[in-house]
């Protein structure tokens, strides 16, 4: 989530032109960059909850980008929140 927010800021500030340039700079595919940036389509409450998750020292993350792909495809924020419960 933080990566999506900071990279979006780079575009807004004019430091990079678009997602394709971000992908090249980050050495990831354009498809992967789109997956990351799609997290910005999450409801603000969900974004905030993700940002305030405790850092994981061992084991897997409590939520992954892959798990959120279905949610980011939903435009209605109330429905997104229902899916995340």
Image (spheres, rainbow, N blue to C red):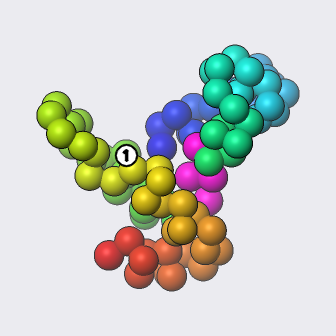
- Total labels: the figure holds 1
- Residue 13 coordinates in the image, percent (x, y): 75, 27
Q: Quadrant of residue 81?
A: bottom left
Q: Main secondary structure of the magenta part?
A: helix
The answer to whether one can see residue 6 in this image is yes
Q: Is residue 77 above or below residue 15?
A: below
- Residue 5 coordinates in the image, percent (x, y): 56, 39
The span shown in magenta is 36-41
- Residue 76 coordinates in the image, percent (x, y): 60, 79
Judge by depth and name the residue closer to the eye, 13 or 79. 79
- Residue 64 coordinates in the image, percent (x, y): 39, 50
Query: Residue at the right extreme?
Result: 17
Please report the residue visible at 26 percent of the width from the left and 52 percent of the height from the top.
62
The quarter of the picture where the C terminus appears is bottom left
Tell me the residue that label 1 is attached to.
Answer: 51
Indicate left or right for 47 with 26 as reference.
Answer: left
Is 38 one of the magenta-colored residues? yes
Label 1: few (<14), some (14–19) or many (≥20) C-alpha neighbours in 10 Å: few
Is 15 one of the magenta-colored residues? no
Please report the residue visible at 71 percent of the width from the left and 28 percent of the height from the top.
23
Q: Secondary structure at mark 1?
A: helix
Judge by depth and name the residue closer to the eye, 66 or 57. 66
Please report the residue visible at 52 percent of the width from the left and 68 percent of the height from the top.
71
Q: Is residue 47 above or below residue 83?
A: above
């Amino acid at each position: 989530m933080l990566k999506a927010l900071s990279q979006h800021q780079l575009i807004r500030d004019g430091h990079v032109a678009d997602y394709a340039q971000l992908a090249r700079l980050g050495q990831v595919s354009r498809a992967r960059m789109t997956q990351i940036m799609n997290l910005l389509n999450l409801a603000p409450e969900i974004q905030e909850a993700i940002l305030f998750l405790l850092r994981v020292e061992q084991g897997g993350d409590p939520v992954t980008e892959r798990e959120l792909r279905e949610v980011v495809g939903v435009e209605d924020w109330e429905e997104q929140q229902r899916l995340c419960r």
